[in-house]
Image (cartoon, grey):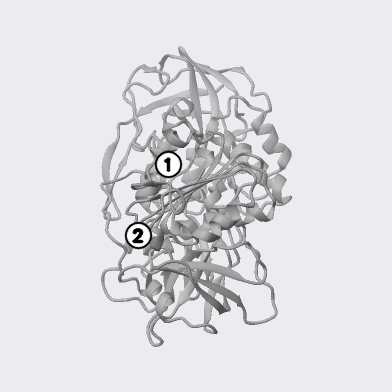
Amino acid sequence: MARLLSVNVGLPREISWRGQTVYTAVWKEPVEGRCMVRRLNIDGDAQGDLAGHGGEQRAVFVYQIESYRYWERELNRSDFTFGQFGENFTVEGLADSEVCIGDRYRIGGALFEVTQPRVTCYRVGIRMDDPRMPALLVAHRRPGFYFRVLEEGEVGAGDEIIKVAEGPEHLTVAAVDALLYLPKPAKEDVERALRISALSPGWQSSFEAMLQQMAQSGSRTGNAGLASPEQMATAAPGFRSLKVARIDRESSSVVSLILEPTDDRPLTVPLTGQFVALRLRPQPDGPPVLRSYSLSGLPDAHRYRISVKQEPHGLASTYVNTQLRIGDVLEVSEPRGAFTLQPGDRPVVLLSAGVGVTPVLAMLHALVSQASVRPVWWIFGARNSGEHPFAQEVRDLLAKLPNARSYVQYSQPDSTDRLGFDFDAAGRLTATVLKALELPLESDFYLCGPPAFLADFTAGLADRGVVRDRIHTEVFGSGKSITPGVANAAHRPPHAPDGPAGEGPSISFARTGLTVSWDSKFQSLLELAEACDVPVRWSCRSGVCHMCESGLISGSVQYDPEPLDAPAVGNLLICCARPQEDMVIDL
């Protein structure tokens, strides 16, 4: 007979961890007497991070005394108390290998439904004083699971747990957990999981992404159920020598480089909208400088075109604009990036400002090469005609599309700029134009430009009712950090770690332009990035969740611990990786 042994609750608290403050409710304490279970929580309980825990689908977390005993033996420990694993219900019975998603149980006066396994994160490692725990819980097939509350009521220690309904596909908690986190999931089992209506929406989305990946590739490289589309846009690591075959002046501040192979091997044909990383040497005796530039021409196996704006005090852009000569040889990465033109027949809106025009220009070239009949809107903002790159090229391309429309806005037009020819309106291009132009909301919108431009248009499109997956943006700077539960995190510009420089391999963070030497005092590349205040994303910190998956532009790593499921080819998991040689990481 299954029994409820303890009801455990806890409110969020601030704890000190690795020099930071973490806001967490992973510490739970047993409740005396009976306790009311409500739709979102047990009385006296709460969650510190509602993005990863809590909510209707994760109202009550359950863990088994049999797993307590297992971990006591496995870890050689005898200090566990009820609530040790952050659970609300400590139970006897209800093994992860027996309980199925969709099963329903009556406990005391409440009715519950099993919705998903635990989404493991680093905080259980803090609570257990063992950072390996997130990975161990999954690897040993003992994650625990969540209840949804179907009927509110009182419960208490000693209550019998009565099974009143079985999940429709008879897929156990352990089996569903393994489908997402462990290698080689069976397609038919993923399909079975998606037929369980009780499975929480987050897990359903992950399995839908996995099925789509399986259908597209026929095999599984990386894990689309864990990594975002941006993380899954991979390329082979390494740089290739390409020569500058031509240099074209596009505006007062932008030049284009035509790059061709130095040998007979064809180039990798990029997806429309992708970028390449360049390793430049502005000073022959100085350190290399890394920069990423969009490919601005039609995808081609014989040549790449990149276009570079000279920025004030920009070391790399000044070198490209003033010192490079035809015949010079550059180190260029394989094309990468997820900002790519999507197939289909929906209208396309290409929105850009300044040199952000480059990836959407490549998309325009592709639409022309396909003789596309899709409705195409070209919307662009610049200061004036002197800073309007590719103006005639764009006009020529748009003239070849039967359903193309254009709108150009100059923020500070010159006296010689012609209204109605060079530009359509004066003033800074903002999201107010969306309503005035009556853009079709069912379009795919592609945005590239300065951060303020992207924020304005992304918010404007959302306000207009455009669904999120139709809004595609390209950001070349560092992404936003995801550090769940860390309170009052400092935001400083990236810098070398404090203290003496390391003596290990060179580690370059491409998006920040920072290069430092590896120091063995760090346990992972994630720890090094944090010491440098490089923006990072993570959750489990032990090779399970793939939140930290990043592009590997060059170099190689060794893992400790080994990830439970490998990242996509051309990527790495920085949370458990250490360098084997000089590296360039897309961070």
Nearest the viewer among 569 and 543 is 569
Q: Identify residue for label 2.
A: 530
Image quarter hosting the C terminus: bottom left
Element under label 1? helix
In the picture, measured across the screen, residue 353 lies left or right of residue 193, that is left
Mark 1 vs 2: CB contact within 8 A: no
Nearest the viewer among 338 and 418 is 418
In the picture, measured across the screen, residue 158 lies left or right of residue 260, that is left
**Up-down relation of residue 198 to residue 308 (above or below):** above
The amino acid type, in three-letter code, at marker 1 is Thr
Q: Identify residue for label 1.
A: 458
Q: Which residue corresponds to the image point at 38% horizontal and 62% vertical from the top-left?
A: 529
Percent x, y of residue 462? 44, 35
Instruction: Give residue 443's quadrant in the image.
Output: top right
Q: Taking the image as drawn, is residue 509 in sight?
A: no
Q: Which residue corresponds to the image point at 61% horizontal and 47% vertical from the top-left?
A: 342
